[in-house]
Image (cartoon, helix red, strand yellow):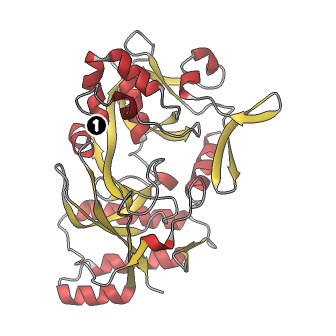
């Protein structure tokens, strides 16, 4: 089951049109003035990010190809471009580095003046118990045995077989009843409702249970429902609508926050992990180097990002497309992975800003 599940996740993460609309060509803007490709002192994270992209492309089938922005690319071209980019970063002469970069790469900006924005995400740390009580009442569920994922055109359909018919999978409110899942899956642990919401929103978490070593949970699957933010119901109730601030709001408004979270029909199932947090295609997420983008944009490719926010400001930061997100769709949309813990949580909640995103592609 675990091998089959990994295959499904790997297949889905490498099907760019699955559950996503084609990106309009008008949103791709050729770059006339090449931004400066900065040398960096942060070589450790950069090396790790390069290696994750390289390993991802190496795992793809030998005949793998992808069509993107009028061109077709194969795994060898992407692997060679990563090697070339890594070599260029070692060049100390700024002028020479820029000339060689222009010879080897196509810079393509992805932009949408209305919907495009850069946000941040992180890996949350949550407390849990093995048995439920009044406070730790929400189960962290593994993927149910009856969950089925089908491809229908460009969409992903998630459901189950009932009386011989394929029907949509259970919503969050239906999964609130333990009798609905007891014979189909099991709980990894029980957490507070806000912590479950945050883990499902971010896609992974560090779980701490008293008397046990902490362990990591990562995204395994979901019920295929559209995400509805609790903030749609809590405007005017909570002083701050930043997701992590719901921990404070629920103290004063427990019923309102709980009701708002349960209105979101989307439910994410998890699996226990012993390794670092992973994005799509089994790629390890590297803090401030990994980003999530639209499913049509090839996994593994590098990009340059620039933005300003109260928490973090970046200028031509070299990052890599290592992840996807249910709400990260369309041109100019990017989610920036900031790491694990409180500092990353505080930063992530305060990045909600326009920015510039330049995809780095092999020049044909």
The count of marks equals 1
Determine the residue located farthest toward the top in the rendered image: 134
Q: Quadrant of residue 3?
A: top right
Q: Mark 1: which secondary structure? A: loop
The crowd level at tag 1 (other Cα within 10 Å; few <14, some 14-19, many 20+) is few
Of 99 and 265, the residue lying toward us: 265
For this view, does 32 lie left or right of residue 53?
A: left
Determine the residue located farthest toward the right in the rendered image: 164
Of 140 and 193, the residue lying toward us: 193
Q: Residue 354 location in percent, x, y?
A: 28, 59
Q: Dividing the image into 4 quarters, which one contains the N terminus?
A: top right
Circle 1 is placed at which residue position?
Answer: 242
Figure check: 177 above or below 315:
above
Figure check: 194 above or below 117:
above
Q: Residue 353 location in percent, x, y?
A: 27, 54
Q: Residue 15 location in percent, x, y?
A: 60, 59
């Amino acid at each position: 089951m675990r091998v089959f599940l990994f295959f499904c996740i790997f297949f889905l993460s490498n099907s760019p049109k699955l559950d996503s609309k084609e990106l309009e060509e008008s949103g791709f803007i050729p770059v006339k003035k090449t931004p400066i490709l900065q040398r960096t002192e942060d070589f450790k994270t950069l090396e790790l990010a390069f290696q994750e992209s390289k390993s991802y492309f190496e795992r793809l089938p030998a005949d793998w190809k992808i069509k993107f922005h009028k061109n077709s690319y194969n795994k060898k071209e992407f692997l060679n471009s990563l090697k070339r980019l890594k070599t260029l970063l070692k060049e100390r002469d700024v002028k020479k580095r820029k000339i060689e970069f222009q010879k080897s790469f196509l810079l393509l900006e992805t932009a949408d003046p209305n919907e495009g924005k850069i946000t941040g995400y992180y890996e949350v740390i949550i407390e849990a118990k093995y048995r439920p009580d009044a406070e730790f009442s929400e189960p962290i569920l593994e993927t149910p045995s009856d969950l089925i994922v089908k491809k229908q055109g460009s969409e992903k359909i998630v459901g189950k077989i009932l009386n011989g018919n394929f029907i949509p999978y259970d919503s969050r409110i239906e999964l609130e009843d333990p009798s609905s899942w007891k014979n189909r899956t099991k709980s990894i642990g029980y957490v507070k409702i806000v912590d479950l919401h945050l883990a499902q929103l971010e896609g992974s978490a560090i779980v701490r249970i008293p008397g046990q070593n902490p362990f990591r949970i990562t995204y395994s699957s979901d019920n295929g429902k559209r995400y509805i933010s609790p903030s749609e119901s809590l405007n005017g109730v909570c002083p701050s609508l930043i997701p992590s601030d719901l921990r404070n709001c629920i103290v004063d408004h427990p019923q309102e926050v709980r009701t708002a979270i349960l209105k979101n029909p989307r439910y994410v199932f998890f699996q226990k992990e012993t390794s670092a947090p992973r994005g799509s295609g089994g790629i390890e997420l590297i803090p401030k180097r990994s980003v999530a983008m639209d499913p049509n944009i090839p996994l593994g490719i590098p990009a340059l990002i620039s933005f300003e926010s109260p928490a973090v400001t970046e200028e031509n930061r070299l990052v890599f497309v290592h992840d996807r997100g249910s709400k990260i769709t369309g041109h100019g949309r990017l989610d920036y992975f900031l790491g694990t813990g409180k500092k990353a949580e505080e930063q992530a909640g305060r990045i909600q800003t326009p920015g510039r995103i330049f995809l780095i592609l092999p020049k044909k």
